Amino acid sequence: MFKLKLKDGATVSTIEELRENFDLEKVVDCFHSGELLQWLKERFYDDEAEAIENIDDDTNLIAKICTALNVECEEDLEFTQRLREKKALLAEMTDDENFIDNAASTALNQEDLAALIQTGCKTIYLCGEKFNVPICMAGVKYIGVLSTPKIKIRAKSQDDLDAQKIVFENCILPWQKYIPVQIDEKNIGLISNMPLQVTVELGRTKKTIQEILDLATGSILELNRLSDEPFDIQVNNHLLAKGEVVIIDKNFGVRITEIVAPVKRVARVSDNYSKE
């Protein structure tokens, strides 16, 4: 028999444990996936299983689940429906389960942000282009994810934020031109969906203006690279690797033969990111 997984990886084996550690969000997820019903049936909680099985629509869903399991909880169907919507939207943006798991504390628009602030959420993930953040709500940490949101807030400097113990990560504040973030291997996921320009350089040469004007169809430019030398692979004008040309289904490709160390790779990617 499998154990039912609740918040923070906790598992329960009995109905008493479920009631004691009741987690509305996880239980609703388990209801929709069918795990809750299977868990009840495997343990012969026949009355509870029958009550869960008889729930045929989402009208007053939370109240029905709580009644079936004999637990007390406030009915908040609107919250649950929006949470499911946010998880679905985040799943379309990324395959990273960490972002999807944080859907309950993620704002995809200004309305989501207002709701999270009202509930007293102290760490809020911002996924969108821009947000209006109140300076009066102290002690809140805002983290931009899957985007670099622009923040509008009644603060003139970092000192104003510090006074209110408000923290921003991966967000552009009114007095900033770009995001001053240090990306490393631990938080590279924050920008993993950002597009980068990858270029393979065959070689370079210098010509005078007159030589450029003299170019015509059939002219040959001699490059500064030997024919057997590997080509440079650049990401946003930063050297990332070297490789050799291959043919893939009638298209050119490059097989990587040398690549910079992961730490340097992350540093170069983050340098490009901070200047976007």
Image (cartoon, rainbow, N blue to C red):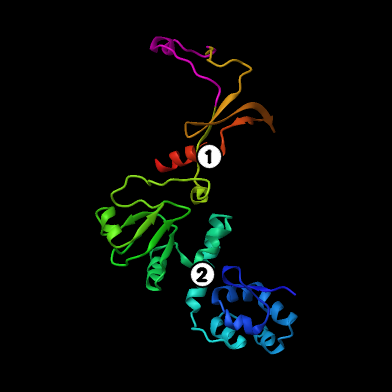
Tag 2: residue type? Answer: Leu
Q: Position of residue 11 (x, y in %)?
A: 64, 73
Q: Residue at x 63, y 74 (%)?
A: 30
Q: Earlier in the sequence, mark 1 or mark 2?
A: 2
Q: How many marks?
A: 2
Tag 1: residue type? Answer: Val
User: Disc number at residue 83?
Assistant: 2
Q: Which residue is mark 1?
A: 263
Residue 259 is left or right of residue 38, and the answer is: left
Question: From what the image shows, is residue 214 above or below residue 27?
Answer: above
Where does the N terminus fall, quadrant-wise?
bottom right
Where does the C terminus fall, quadrant-wise?
top left
Span colored in magenta:
201-219
CB under 8 Å between callouts 1 and 2? Answer: no
Q: Quadrant of residue 275?
A: top left
- Taking the image as drawn, is residue 246 in sight? yes
Q: Position of residue 213 (x, y in %)?
A: 41, 12
